[in-house]
């Protein structure tokens, strides 16, 4: 890395932040493209967000990714909000431009581009599990491509609220939803830990299901999908594609997605093609 007086600053804000893989693949991309910029993590406590953001603006930072727990809170602190940020209610990308901060959301397009590696979502019946922040970006994306969505959430009231907002259907019975669905998307945090109670009996997956889990690691749901011979995907591709779209916003350059993926191989990025799932 060749940091000079002209080097521009990009980064990611969150709390905690040490686990973030964005610096790994964003710096790989900047370096590959020969762009005179570095991307660094900033651990910022929620109570310091306003001051920190202003400080970063004054320090001349050009762009930021925003992660948990700041994705909603930044909306109050920026000068402009893109249409998709307004609809999703969260931003994951900020661009600093002529002293102003503009908020974008690339999670939804990251989800779509990642899913495209696996299946064509247009007019598919998609079962979405969860009604939190991640679900909002997924629902926005699915509506955008005209998928038919069944939404399930542990707390039904939240699903009903979201379903009204995004004009999708709510489902009570997960097993029934599974039978109707061609694609299953897990947006909940279930599976982060191996001891988490499964959302449903994963043995009920059929090999025709396409399974997408937004969690990076191989969750029990993804493992079950692999064992059934389903096409499946962890959260890694979405992580890369949302970052790639942020990269495009900051630099105006076509993001080197292959380089980004390669840089994550030591961090568990799946090397096997999702088009050729192992059948056991
Ligand atoms: P994120 O921003 O990552 O989506 P979130 O907004 O906290 O995180 O949402 C977490 C989602 O995981 C919610 O849909 C939550 O369900 P509830 O609305 O019922 O809380 C879901 N979730 C978390 N733990 C769960 C569990 N043990 N079983 C089922 N759903 C769970």
Image (cartoon, rainbow, N blue to C red):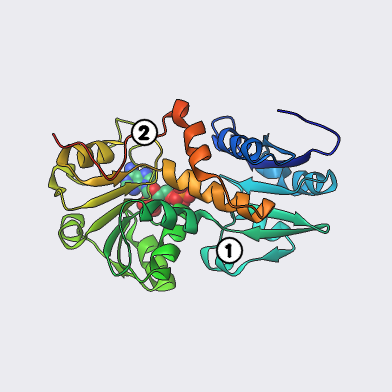
Q: Answer whether labels 2 and 1 touch (C-beta < 8 Å).
A: no
| Residue 206 x, y percent position in the rendering | 14, 49
Figure quadrant of residue 201: top left
- The residue that disc 2 covers is 271
Rendering coords of residue 50 (x, y %): 75, 49
Q: Which residue lies at the image location 34% right of the left edge and 56% below the top edge?
A: 155
> Is there any visible trace of residue 216 in the rendered image?
yes
Vertical placement of 187 versus 127: above or below? Answer: above
On the rendered structure, is 67 left or right of 174?
right
Q: Residue 146 carries which label?
A: none
- Tell me: is circle 1 under 8 Å from ligand 1: no
Q: Between residues 184 and 152, which one lies in front from this camera angle?
A: 184
85, above or below 36, in the image: below
In the image, 166 versus 147, the foreground residue is: 147
Mark 2 residue CB less than 8 A from any atom of ligand 1: no
Quadrant of the image containing the C terminus = top left
Rendered image quadrant of residue 30? top right
Horizontally, is 42 left or right of 265 in the view? right
* Label 1: few (<14), some (14–19) or many (≥20) C-alpha neighbours in 10 Å: many
Farthest residue, direction top: 266
Give how far across and how far down residue 1 sits, in percent: 70, 28
Residue at 81% x, 44% y is: 55
Look at 24% across and 36% down and name the residue there.
223
Residue 264 location (% of width, % of height): 48, 32
CA–CA distance in space, label 2 to label 1: 32 Å
Vertical placement of residue 127 versus 144, above or below? above
Please tell me whether mark 1 sits on a helix, a strand or a loop. Answer: helix
Query: Horizontal placement of 111 versus 251: left or right?
Result: left
In the rendered image, is residue 92 in sight?
A: no
Give the labeled residue for mark 1: 85
Viewer-nearest of discs 2 and 1? 2
């Amino acid at each position: 890395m060749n940091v000079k007086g002209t080097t521009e600053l990009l980064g990611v804000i969150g709390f905690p932040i040490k686990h973030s893989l964005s610096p790994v693949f964003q710096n790989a991309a900047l370096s590959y493209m020969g762009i005179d910029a570095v991307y660094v993590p900033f651990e910022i406590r929620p109570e310091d967000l306003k001051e920190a953001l202003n400080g970063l603006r004054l320090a001349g930072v050009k762009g930021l990714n925003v992660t948990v727990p700041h994705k909603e809170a930044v909306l109050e602190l920026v000068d402009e909000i893109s249409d998709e940020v307004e609809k999703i209610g969260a931003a994951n990308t900020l661009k600093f431009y002529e002293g102003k901060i503009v908020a974008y959301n690339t999670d939804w397009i990251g989800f779509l581009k990642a899913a495209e590696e696996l299946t064509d979502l247009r007019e598919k019946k998609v079962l979405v599990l969860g009604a939190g922040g991640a679900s909002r970006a997924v629902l926005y994306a699915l509506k955008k491509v005209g998928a038919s969505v069944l939404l399930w959430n542990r707390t039904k009231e939240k699903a009903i609220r979201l379903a009204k907002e995004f004009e999708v259907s709510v489902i009570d019975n997960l097993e029934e939803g599974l039978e109707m669905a061609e694609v299953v998307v897990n947006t909940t945090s279930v599976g982060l830990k191996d001891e988490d109670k499964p959302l449903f009996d994963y043995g009920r997956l059929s090999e025709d299901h396409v399974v997408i889990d937004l969690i990076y690691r191989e969750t029990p749901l993804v493992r079950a999908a692999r064992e059934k011979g389903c096409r499946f995907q962890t959260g890694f591709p979405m992580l890369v594609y949302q970052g790639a779209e942020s990269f495009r916003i900051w630099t105006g350059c076509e993001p080197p997605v292959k380089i980004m993926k390669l840089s994550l191989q030591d961090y568990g990025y799946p090397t096997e093609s999702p088009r050729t799932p192992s059948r056991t």
